[in-house]
Image: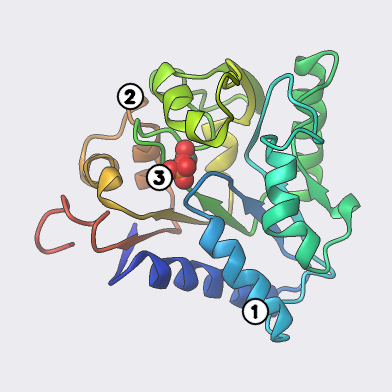
Amino acid sequence: MRVAVLPSADEAERHVAALFAAQLRRKPDSVLGLATGGTPVGVYRALVAAHRAGEADFGKARTFNLDEYAGVPPSHPQSYAAYMRTHLFDHVNLSPDRTHLPEGDADRAEDACRLYDALYRYYGPADLQLLGIGANGHIGFNEPGFVSATGGTQVVRLAESTRRANARFFGEGEQVPAYALTMSAGRILQARSIVLLATGAAKAAIVARALEGPIGTDCPASLLQLHPDATVVLDLEAAGALAPERG
Ligand code: PGA
């Protein structure tokens, strides 16, 4: 894995956005794998700016998101579909039929997973996949101990630590959904290139474990050590627990 440590979160986010803009220039019809959460917000802000500056053309691109909450319709403000519209899709030239997320409110989540996986197998794999990392080491919603290397897109039960971490996005009295639809770790690892972004001191310990610890499903992000073209982009705080020669 390549590791790039930038002085600040802002610079780390802009570094990742530049990788995506470069990918689009190199291959305009790229399949981009996208992620949600607090971490990528600044990446999308920088990508929108790049688009407005004429440096990122999404007209021929196609996007696949990692996951979506189960039972949550795209109109719900905390759905990842709404997140993507707010932070990226509404501000760049991506037509909605080229953006894909699992259908969170499908009558039968398993069918929605099968359809999503079929679409990904047809159009994918991603040329460049963006990932965050949960404080518990999850990628997508592949929670510690519940990682499938072979499955496609799956219904998963969210770890309590994940529900607690994501409660900040939900209103008071609103429940974080208990289940989600997620691309499996195996599918994620099929991406041609992967860039994982982590910022802030709260991610330092899990980043060190993912990069330097043993490879195992108890830290799903450690599976990236197996990927031939993975880049980890950190700010100084998130790099704070790495062995000295790295951080
Ligand atoms: P965060 O989530 O960016 O909100 O910290 C990361 C993740 O859960 O993958």
Q: Quadrant of residue 102?
A: top right
> Is the C terminus in the top left, top right, bottom left or bottom right quadrant?
bottom left
The number of numbered discs placed on residues in the rendered structure image is 3
Q: Amino acid at mark 3?
A: Leu
The residue indicated by pointer 3 is: 224
Give how far apart the Cα atoms at labels 1 and 2 are. Answer: 37 Å
Give how far apart the Cα atoms at labels 2 and 3 are. Answer: 13 Å
The residue indicated by pointer 1 is: 50
The residue indicated by pointer 2 is: 218
Q: Is 155 displayed left or right of 91 in the figure?
A: left
Outermost residue to the left: 244
Judging depth in this view, the residue of 97 and 117 nearest the camera is: 97
Vertical comparison of 243 with 111: above or below: below
The residue mark sitting in front, 1 or 2, is 1
- Is residue 157 in view? yes
Among the two numbered marks 3 and 1 on one chain, the one whose residue lies closer to the N terminus: 1
Residue 97 screen position, x and y as percent: 90, 51
Residue at 61% x, 24% y: name it.
151
Residue 203 screen position, x and y as percent: 30, 45
What is the secondary structure assignment of the residue under circle 2? loop
Judging depth in this view, the residue of 195 and 179 nearest the camera is: 179
Residue at 33% x, 24% y: name it.
218
Q: Is 197 displayed left or right of 179 in the figure?
A: left
Q: Please rate how many residues cluster around mark 1, counting C-alpha atoms within 10 Å: few if below 14, some from 14 to 19, many from 20.
A: some
* Label 2 CB less than 8 angstroms from ligand 1: no
Q: Amino acid at mark 1?
A: Ala
Vertical comparison of 84 with 115: above or below: below
Residue at 60% x, 66% y: name it.
45
Residue 128 screen position, x and y as percent: 59, 59
